[in-house]
Image: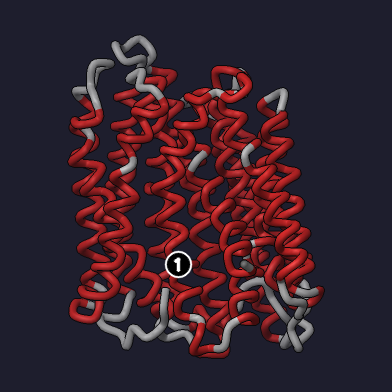
């Protein structure tokens, strides 16, 4: 029961990342949300989650894994209720930010509790269940979101996507309070609150004008460029701050010594570049299918469903079969296959009309999902394989943090391109949606080409002993 409740909480977090994409057109219509609002509803969650996850792990070490888990799930549940009751787009964005913040307190305690409850030789099943959650959430999110939208319980529409977290969260809180063991770390790591504030400020200075640019068209004001330059400068200061703390033997947010391992630096860069177009795709594809082509939420959910299924299958094939034989070539094959999937989707979108159905997009969705699966699992193993055992937790946390940051930037970057193109091609038969989507695909292909070049930083072959 204890394992079930912590896995349920983790699943709620993952589901809230995938399920929201399909509700955005309905949110936009009811709350008169701007393109920037839609992007912040996604990026605000992933950004606060990424910035808080390492601090959340350290809070568990300091104050007890159970206590911090309970605070996290309680806050997540309250924030979900705020999302469901949001009267305006601004309130919904703020509630999503709070959701991400409490998810960052809740999720790191899951692995800590598994380590606490099971002896090393007993953890295999629990870890396998935990690892399968992301694929399950990705597959469940679009369909569950569509079902909730079409059911329209009590006339709540898209709000039920958030309201459903409330009874589940209350049940999980009460069960966790009764069955989870009490424990904390024997070490007393310091909290780098200054690092959190500096990195948060830098990322907001970069992301805010980037997302705001989706409403500005092609002519951005001077302040937007100044803000982004200042943000990059602040982030450079954050990196220097981390080196300074590490040199003094303190506890930085990022274990900078890991960057001396070539595979880690290269793998994290690939992780970042890879997730930019992938997360941007999920936002723009749902916009194309629903407002652009007039699909119902259920039709749109069924159209994207083969992607996570193909990703899950290809991830197992890539990690267990191809990686031991081909090494980094597995990742490179995945990038090429993903690019092929994007090309197929661009071709399908270019000739799409409101009469187009899911069959036209099926080849691109399946091929793209296979490419993602062939990339993600082998990339994690190649990146972390050379990490010393003493830094294993830091390496895994950093890898996941980079993915979340890339999700935030990807939504901001590709959302801006998409909505800017949309505003300048509104007179086209599909309202400019096909043109805007195709433009983001070509940008995605450029980034994938850069990612392929960077992939040569990965080890040709590794021992591949560290699980993803």
Q: Left or right: 458 with respect to 394?
A: left
Q: Position of residue 384 (x, y in %)?
A: 43, 79
Q: Position of residue 10 (x, y in %)?
A: 58, 59
Crowding near the residue tagged with mark 1, few <14, some 14–19, many ≥20 C-alpha atoms within 10 Å = few
- Residue 435 seen by the camera: yes
**Closer-to-camera residue (146/104):** 146
Residue drawn 55% across the image and 41% down it: 42
Q: Circle 1 sits on which residue?
A: 131
In the image, residue 181 sits, relative to residue 317, either above or below, namely: below
In the image, residue 347 sits, relative to residue 269, either above or below, namely: above
Residue drawn 27% across the image and 60% down it: 313
Q: Position of residue 16 (x, y in %)?
A: 56, 45
Q: Position of residue 137 (x, y in %)?
A: 46, 51
- Which of the 4 quarters of the picture holds residue 262? bottom left
Where disc 1 sits, the SS reads helix
Q: Left or right: 190 with respect to 264?
A: right
Judged from this view, the residue extending furthest toward the right is 63
Placement of the N terminus among the 4 image quadrants: bottom right
Q: Left or right: 339 with respect to 182?
A: left
Residue drawn 44% across the image and 59% down it: 272
């Amino acid at each position: 029961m204890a394992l079930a409740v912590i896995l349920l909480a983790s699943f709620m977090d993952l589901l809230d990342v995938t399920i929201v994409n399909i509700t955005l057109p309905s949110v936009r219509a009811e709350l008169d949300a701007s393109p920037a609002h839609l992007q912040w509803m996604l990026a605000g969650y992933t950004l606060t989650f990424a910035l808080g996850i390492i601090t959340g792990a350290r809070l568990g070490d300091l104050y007890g894994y159970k206590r911090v888990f309970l605070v996290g799930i309680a806050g997540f549940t309250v924030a979900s209720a705020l999302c469901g009751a949001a009267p305006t787009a601004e309130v919904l964005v703020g509630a999503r930010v709070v959701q991400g913040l409490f998810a960052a307190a809740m999720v790191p305690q899951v692995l800590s509790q598994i380590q606490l409850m099971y002896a090393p030789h007993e953890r295999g099943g629990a870890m396998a269940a935990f690892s399968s959650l992301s694929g399950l959430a990705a597959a469940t999110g679009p369909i569950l979101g569509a079902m909730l939208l079409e059911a329209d319980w009590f006339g709540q529409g898209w709000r039920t996507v958030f309201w459903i977290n409330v009874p589940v969260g209350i049940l999980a809180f009460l069960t966790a309070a009764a069955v989870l063991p009490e424990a904390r770390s024997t070490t007393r790591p310091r909290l780098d609150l200054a690092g959190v504030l500096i990195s948060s400020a830098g990322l907001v200075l970069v992301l805010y004008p980037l997302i705001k640019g989706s409403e500005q068209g092609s002519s951005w004001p001077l302040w937007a460029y100044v803000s982004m330059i200042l943000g990059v400068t602040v982030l450079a200061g954050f990196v220097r701050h981390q080196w300074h703390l590490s040199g003094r033997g303190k506890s930085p947010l990022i274990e900078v010594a890991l960057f001396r391992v070539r595979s880690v630096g290269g793998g994290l860069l690939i992780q970042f570049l890879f997730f930019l177009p992938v997360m941007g795709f999920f936002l723009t594809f749902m916009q194309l299918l629903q407002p652009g082509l007039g699909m119902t939420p259920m039709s749109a959910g069924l159209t994207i469903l083969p992607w996570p299924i193909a990703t899950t299958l290809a991830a197992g094939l890539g990690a267990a079969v191809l990686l031991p034989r081909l090494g980094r070539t597995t990742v490179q094959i995945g990038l090429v296959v993903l690019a092929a999937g994007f090309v197929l989707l661009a071709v399908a979108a270019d000739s799409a009309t409101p009469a187009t159905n899911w069959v036209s997009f099926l080849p691109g969705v399946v091929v793209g999902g296979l490419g993602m699966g062939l990339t993600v699992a082998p990339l994690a193993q190649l990146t972390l394989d050379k990490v010393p055992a003493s830094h294993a937790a830091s390496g895994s946390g950093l890898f996941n943090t980079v993915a979340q940051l890339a999700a935030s930037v990807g939504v901001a970057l590709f959302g801006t391109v998409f909505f800017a193109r949309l505003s300048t091609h509104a007179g086209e038969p599909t309202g400019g949606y096909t043109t805007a989507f195709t433009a983001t695909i070509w940008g995605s292909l450029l980034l994938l080409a850069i990612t392929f070049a960077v992939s040569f930083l990965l080890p040709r072959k590794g021992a591949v002993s560290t699980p993803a």
